[in-house]
Image: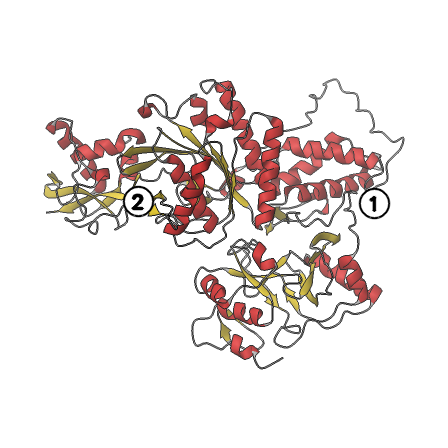
């Protein structure tokens, strides 16, 4: 290899991210990224433990990242490395999946002769990536070109060393086919025919090779698999795994019974296998879907449309044996149940914005007119699109489709103001605005919205993480918001979007005539949402209160303030607003920690002194001398409902530097409230200190 590789891959005397077993030198992920870029390959960051780019990667299918971008991505963040395949990198990849893929490679070499020596990488799942020079003509990225073989060509990418798989194993270069020692080879003619040839069909007769197929990700466990099926737990790719399981069981039952099984017989064997390995809490994975797929498969087999499974003619299932105690009527579908082991293995809550917006839930942000609720949701959307933290809350990057049913004219200014304020004016973010209302109760418009979201994801080169509906009222024209039935239709539409797009759906909604009584309309909406956020405004400050978080504790209320952003250009005077966290003036958890004037901690006692002192003794007994506890946890310990807990604490416990003195366990103590950090979003804690 040329000597200039050493300039891209230095041996550094710092803690190693990975070790090159060929040379024995320790190198960081950034070193590897620069090395790959030096070979002329397009490099993108990959989410830790995943196969998903951490940035919108469509631009890097046509142009390689700059060294400055590589430094920004890989100096911090813990990202893995993705290599964009195709003409931009001058290569395409044969991706052999697991041991079946290795067996397929051996068979292909027996039939066509040994492949030339080229770069090769070993995948954590036991598969193999073989890299070949791009032929200069289109090479489509396709799934299942042959069983257990994918092609990663134009518009594709692979994960590369030193990335870590979520199973805890790294992607490794083959020691005999390492990029330091071996060059990318030209593909023989039969490989080019395979990679560039026509699309074939899957084992059930349906076309395969589409670039938009979603891969099946598996997590290895010791779960037994009847009928010789794979012994893996499937975390994604529900349709592929469902189809393959049904076909495998169908073949086994035909051999065992010497006839075609009925749908019920097939379901009885498929469901135990399938339900052990698939997260049944996710959409599209229930017993009804499995039974529907079974019936569809049996119809296709009888029509001769499934490769390798000929229709069985004139052989019916035997009649049931006579019985004096008739068996209960067979049920074609069962309600799925989870045992304790399955419940314990369920994944924790995944967040788009930590403690605020869940990754696959339904959220509502509501408030009275002019409360700046749309400004807040736009800010959340752009933080998600850019992957930048919102205040001190971590954010998972993804695309956003914002359906603006009203106020479209002002949206451009709001987005430009946010971009300027955050120093991202010239950055292309995966954020799309749909400048019209969509009737979610109209099946045709609902389907069109889903197609629009999918097309937006493809255009941006990423997944759509959130669809925003602004406002809810514009999305259900003619519906009665006070009708539980009409709101149920809205909820059903939202569930359809969530399942079809695999995203969070967030609605912007109005409060009722009395803002203290919650969002406008039927309480069925509150019962259906995962997250409910209330916005109140006092002058230039707004308060963000998470009133409901179904799967986790509600976050502490946040205070934000309005800041004007100048958008003037030339002789045109223009401005808009952004919402900014308001930090306290001094550090917290000291007697002079937080100013009494801070709006969220202001105290206005309204209870009697006797009641307040009794409550303080209860609080001190829970927190204990020398301890501290967040308001939310203290409210739970006191058995309070969250809605009024902060007001009651305001009455009982003063804000530092003031305090409430009392005696606990025959010793004097002082109670006060202060934030646990310097940020406006730091939780408020109650402190009990000895005097």
The CA span between labels 1 and 2 is 67 Å
On the question of residue 235 being in view, the answer is no
Q: Which of marks 1 and 2 is nearer the N terminus?
A: 1
Q: Which residue position holds label 2?
A: 563
Left or right, 326 with respect to 308, comes to left
Q: Where's residue 144, x and y in %?
A: 73, 52
- Residue drawn at 35 percent across, 40 percent down: 555
Q: Is 220 placed above or below 15 here?
A: above
* Residue 563 visible in rendering: yes
Q: Quadrant of the N terminus?
A: bottom right
> How crowded is the residue under tag 2: few (<14 C-alpha within 10 Å), some, or many (20+)?
some
Q: Which mark is residue 308?
A: 1
Q: What element carries label 1?
A: loop
Q: Quadrant of residue 43?
A: bottom right
Q: In this view, does 64 lie to the left or right of 609?
A: right
As displayed, is residue 607 above or below residue 270? above
Instruction: Give me the disc on residue 596.
Output: none
Query: Of circles 1 and 2, which is in front?
Result: 2
Horizontally, residue 198 falls left or right of residue 50, namely: right
Considering depth in this image, is 417 or 541 the residue closer to the camera?
417
Along the line of sight, which residue is nearer the eye, 638 or 552? Answer: 552
Q: Is residue 131 placed above or below 573 in the rendered structure?
A: below
- Mark 2 lies on a secondary structure that is strand
């Amino acid at each position: 290899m040329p000597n200039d590789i050493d300039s891209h891959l230095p041996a550094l005397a710092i803690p190693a991210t990975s070790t090159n077993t060929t040379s024995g030198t320790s190198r960081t992920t950034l070193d590897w990224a620069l090395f790959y870029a030096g070979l002329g390959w397009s490099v993108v960051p990959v989410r830790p433990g995943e196969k998903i780019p951490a940035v919108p990667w469509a631009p890097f299918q046509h142009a390689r990242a700059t060294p400055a971008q590589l430094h920004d991505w890989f100096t911090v963040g813990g990202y893995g490395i993705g290599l964009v395949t195709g003409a931009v990198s001058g290569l395409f990849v044969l991706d052999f999946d697991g041991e079946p893929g290795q067996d397929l490679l051996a068979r292909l070499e027996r039939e066509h002769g040994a492949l030339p020596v080229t770069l090769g990488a070993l995948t954590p799942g036991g598969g193999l990536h073989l890299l070949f020079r791009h032929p200069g003509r289109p090479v489509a990225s396709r799934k299942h070109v042959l069983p257990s073989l994918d092609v990663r060509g134009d518009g594709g990418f692979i994960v590369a060393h030193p990335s870590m798989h979520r199973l805890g194993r790294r992607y490794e270069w083959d020691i005999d086919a390492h990029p330091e020692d071996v060059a990318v080879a030209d593909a023989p003619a039969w490989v080019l025919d395979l990679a560039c040839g026509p699309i074939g069909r899957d084992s059930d007769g349906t076309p395969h090779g589409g670039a938009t197929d979603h891969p099946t990700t598996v997590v290895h466990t010791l779960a037994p698999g009847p009928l010789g099926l794979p012994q893996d737990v499937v975390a994604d790719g529900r349709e592929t795994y469902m189809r393959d399981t049904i076909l495998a069981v169908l073949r086994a039952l035909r051999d065992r019974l010497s006839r075609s099984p009925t749908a019920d017989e097939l379901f009885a064997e498929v469901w135990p296998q399938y339900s052990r390995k698939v997260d049944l809490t996710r959409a599209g994975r229930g017993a009804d879907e499995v039974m529907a797929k079974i019936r569809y498969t049996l119809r296709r087999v009888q029509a001769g449309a499934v490769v390798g499974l000929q229709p069985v003619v004139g052989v019916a299932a035997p009649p049931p044996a006579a019985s004096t105690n008739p068996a209960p009527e067979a049920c074609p579908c069962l309600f799925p149940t989870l045992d304790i082991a399955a419940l314990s293995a369920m994944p924790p809550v995944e967040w788009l914005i930590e403690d605020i917006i869940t990754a696959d839930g339904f959220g509502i942000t509501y408030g009275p007119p002019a409360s700046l609720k749309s400004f807040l949701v736009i800010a959340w959307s752009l933080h998600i699109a850019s992957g930048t933290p919102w205040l001190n809350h971590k954010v998972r990057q993804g695309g956003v489709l914002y359906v603006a049913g009203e106020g479209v004219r002002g949206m451009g200014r709001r987005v430009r103001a946010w971009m300027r304020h955050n120093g991202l004016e010239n950055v292309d973010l995966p954020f799309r605005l749909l400048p019209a209302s969509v009737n979610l109760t109209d099946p045709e418009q609902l389907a069109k919205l889903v197609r629009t979201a999918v097309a937006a994801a493809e255009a941006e080169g990423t997944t759509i993480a959130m669809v925003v509906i602004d406002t809810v009222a514009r999305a259900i024209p003619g519906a009665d918001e006070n009708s539980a039935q009409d709101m149920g239709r809205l909820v059903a539409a939202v569930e359809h979007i969530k399942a079809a797009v695999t995203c969070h759906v967030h609605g912007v909604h109005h409060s009722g005539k009395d803002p203290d009584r919650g969002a406008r309309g039927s309480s069925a909406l509150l019962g259906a949402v995962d997250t409910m956020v209330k916005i109140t405004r006092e002058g230039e400050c707004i308060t963000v209160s998470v009133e409901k978080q179904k799967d986790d504790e509600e976050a502490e209320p946040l205070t934000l303030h309005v800041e004007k952003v100048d958008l003037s250009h030339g002789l045109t005077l223009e401005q808009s607003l952004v919402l900014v966290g308001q930090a306290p003036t001094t550090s917290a958890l000291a007697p002079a920690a937080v100013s009494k004037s801070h709006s969220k901690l202001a105290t206005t006692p309204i209870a009697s002194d006797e009641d307040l002192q009794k409550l303080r003794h209860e609080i001190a007994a829970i927190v204990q001398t020398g301890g501290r506890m967040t308001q939310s946890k203290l409210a739970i310990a006191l058995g309070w409902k969250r809605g009024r807990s902060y007001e009651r604490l305001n009455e009982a416990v003063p804000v530092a530097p003031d305090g409430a003195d009392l005696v606990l366990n025959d010793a004097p103590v002082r109670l006060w409230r202060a934030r646990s950090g310097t940020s406006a979003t730091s939780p408020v804690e109650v402190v009990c200190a000895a005097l």
